[in-house]
Amino acid sequence: MSDETTSERPVERGPTLLEIAYSNVGMIEGARAMAWVVQWAWTSERLGRDPKVEEVAEMWAVSVPKAYRDQARFRKAFPPDQNPGRIWSFIKDQVEVKRRSKANVGRATAQACSARLPAT
């Protein structure tokens, strides 16, 4: 069979979320940037809208200056994104797929952070 009929070529995908963060700010700062994604997303889910930095700080009992530093770290790790909304939406979609297949949701969340983010 020729390559044209098998169509088993791997689909080219971009780097994973962690790879993007690590390449932009290093491993430790990349992990901290991903923590901001979770904090922002949890606050967003609770409020039902995109939160202000001060609201994230209050929800997570951290100082407002620290929250702004965390936001700046996130923006450096993910330059095209001003807030984690797009990334959180991607992670939620990945987790929902796993949930529907009755997979372990905790593991699905961790796997989503290693999934390949579609291009903007």
Image: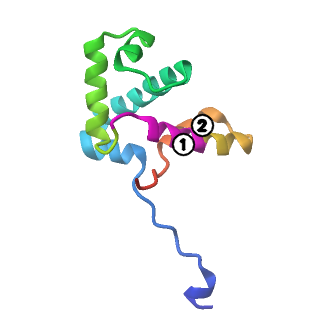
Task: Residue lying at the far front in this picture: please name it.
Answer: 49
Residue placed at 39% from the left, 43% from the top? 18
Residue at disc 1, secondary structure: helix
Q: How crowded is mark 2: few (under 14 residues within 10 Å), some or many (20 or more)?
A: few
The vertical placement of 43 against 61, above or below, is: below
From the viewer's perspective, is 56 left or right of 1? left
Identity, as a three-letter code, of the amino acid under mark 2: Arg
**Residue labelled with disc 2:** 107
User: Is 91 contained in the magenta span?
Assistant: yes
From the viewer's perspective, is 1 left or right of 78? right
Residue placed at 35% from the left, 10% from the top? 62
* Residue 80 visible somewhere in the drawing: yes
Task: Estimate the x, y position of residue 19 in percent, counting from the top left.
Answer: 36, 47
Task: Estimate the x, y position of residue 49 in percent, counting from the top left.
Answer: 50, 25
Task: Estimate the x, y position of residue 40 in percent, counting from the top left.
Answer: 43, 25
**Residue labelled with disc 1:** 111
Task: Estimate the x, y position of residue 103 in percent, counting from the top left.
Answer: 70, 40
The Cα atoms of the two marked residues, 1 and 2, are separated by 6 Å
Mark 1 vs 2: CB contact within 8 A: yes
Residue at disc 2, secondary structure: helix
Identity, as a three-letter code, of the amino acid under mark 1: Gln
Q: What main secondary structure does the magenta stretch of the protein show?
A: helix
Q: Give the magenta-colored segment's residue range.
A: 82-94
Q: How crowded is mark 1: few (under 14 residues within 10 Å), some or many (20 or more)?
A: some
